Amino acid sequence: MGNLGCLHVSILPLTMKIAEYERLLLSAAFQDRGALYKLAAELPETAFGYGPDDNTLSEAHKIIYRAMLLVYYNRQPVDVATVCAQLGNDLSLVGGQAYIVTVAKTLATVGISSTEGLPEWATIVDNAGRVRTVRSVLSTGLERLQDINGTSKSVEDVDLFLATVAEQLGKAGQAKAAYRPISEFVESYEQLLELEGDGQCSDWYPMGWPSLTPYKFFPKSSMVVISAMSSMGKSQFLAEAMLGVAIQLRRYDLPGVISLNTYEMNGERYIARMASCLSRVNLLDEELQTPNSTAHKKLKIATDLIKSLPIIICDDEGMTSSQIIGQTMRLEAERGPVVMVGVDYAELVPDVGDSEELRVSGIFRNCQRLSRMGPSVVVLSQVSNVDMATKIAPPGSTRYTRAGWHAADLSGYIYNPPQMRRAGITFTFPDFLPDPNSAYLIVGKNKYGKTGWVKLDWTPGYVRFADPELDEELFEGINELKGDF
C-alpha cells in the first residue's frame, strides 16, 4: 500500500477476523479525515467484503466505504449523520444507523486511541480482497475448465481462452483501484527521468544505435511493424534489434527478457546470423571448412557473447498468436519482465480465419494486445505492393490487410538498394534519399518520435546492417561486454 507508509505492527490479537480489520479502517476514517484521504488514494472498494456478520461475505462494508468517499468528495464532514444521509435507501442494507454507530466507535471499543495502525490494517484488508478476487475468478473459470468435453467443443480458440483465464488471474491479483491520483503518475515519471539522466532507458528500449535515438526505437508497451520486400533484410534487422537491446540491458544491468518467435527460419539459423554480424565472418567463407581457423574462433567468441544475453527463441511453426500471448505470460511469471517480443513474420503465424485478410488482421490485433501488457512487440511483415519505379511501398501496404498499419505505434519500411542490385531488381533511386549505395529504414508512422528516414550501412557478405555513426563496433557498449570473453 504505497502511500500509506511503513507497516505499523499494532498490538492486536492474531485471532482477529478480516471483518474486524475492515471495521478498524472504517472507524479510523470516521475519526481522522487524513486517514480517509490515504485510503481513498490506495484502497479500492473491492477490498471490502464483509459486514455485521464476521463469517459471511457481504457488501455492507463496501457500501459504507463508498458512501464515506462520496461524502468526503463532496467536502462534507464524514460523520455518522452525513454518511447515513448519503446511504439513503441503502441504509437498511448495511444494518441501519445502529450498525454505522457501532462501526464508527470500533477504535474506542477495542481500546485504540490513534490511527497509527492504518498501514497494517489496510494491507491486511487489501490482501484479503485480492485473495477473494482470485478465488472468484478461479471458481468461475473452473466451471468451464472442469467441463472438458463441453468446453473443448464450444470454445473456438482454446489457446486464447486459456490465455484470457491467465490474464484474468493476473489482474485479479492486482486488486487496485482503476483510477490513481496524479501524484503517483508524477512520481513514476520522475523515476523514469532519473533513469534517462543516468543513461538508462526510460519509456523505450534503445539498441545502441545513435541514428535511431530521435525515433525512440523500441517503445515500451507498443507495437512496431517492420515491413519490406522479400529478402531485403527485415529478419536481419530484427536479429540485430534483439542483440542491441539485449546488450543494453546487460550494459546497464537491467532486468528483462527478450523473446523471438520465428516462423521463416529455425533458431540455429538466427544464431548464425547474429554471430556472423558480430564477428564480421561471412558464413560462406571457405575458411570455415578448416577446423580451428581464425573464422571459427571469431564465430565462437561471438556465440559465447550471444549465449550470455537474455534472449529466448521459439521456432515452433505451430505457435499461434494466442499462444504467444500465453507463453509471454508464462515467461513473465518465470523469468521477470519480457521487454521485447519479436514475430518473424506475421503472415506465417498459423492462426485461422475466414479469409487471409481476417486471419492476418487477427494476428496483428493479438500482437497489439500483447504490447499493451508491457513489452515492445516487433512484428515483421511482407508488403503487398510497391511503386513500380522506385520499389518503395506506400504506408500501410502490409500484405493482405492494413490492420498492421492501423495497430502499429511505430511503422518502418526497409529500403535496401545494395541488396536489390545484388538480386537483379531494377529500380529508380528516389530523389529524397541521399546515397544510392546505402540501405534505409523509412519511418512512416511514429507516435513517440520523429518520422523520416534512417541511413544504414549494409554489408551483404555477412548480412549485416550497421549505424554509420558508429565507426568500428556494431553497438554502443559492446566493448564493455567483449572484455568478459
Image (tube, rainbow, N blue to C red):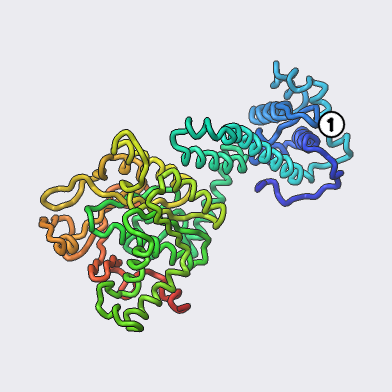
| Residue ID at (55%, 35%) | 148
Among the 4 quarters of the image, the one containing residue 49 = top right
> Does residue 352 appear in the picture of this structure?
yes
What residue does disc 1 label?
A: 105
Picture quarter with the C terminus: bottom left
Q: Residue 151, relative to residue 313: is it above or below?
A: above
Amino acid on which disc 1 is placed: Lys
- The picture places residue 107, in percent across and down from the top left corner, at 84, 36
Q: In the rendered image, which quarter is residue 232 located in? A: bottom left
The crowd level at tag 1 (other Cα within 10 Å; few <14, some 14-19, many 20+) is some
On the image, the x and y values in percent for residue 450 come to 32, 52
Left or right: 209 as drawn, with respect to 203: left
93 in relation to 362, above or below: above
Q: Residue furthest top?
A: 89
Q: Is residue 9 left or right of residue 213?
A: right
Label 1: element kind? loop
Compared to residue 203, the image places residue 114 above or below, namely above
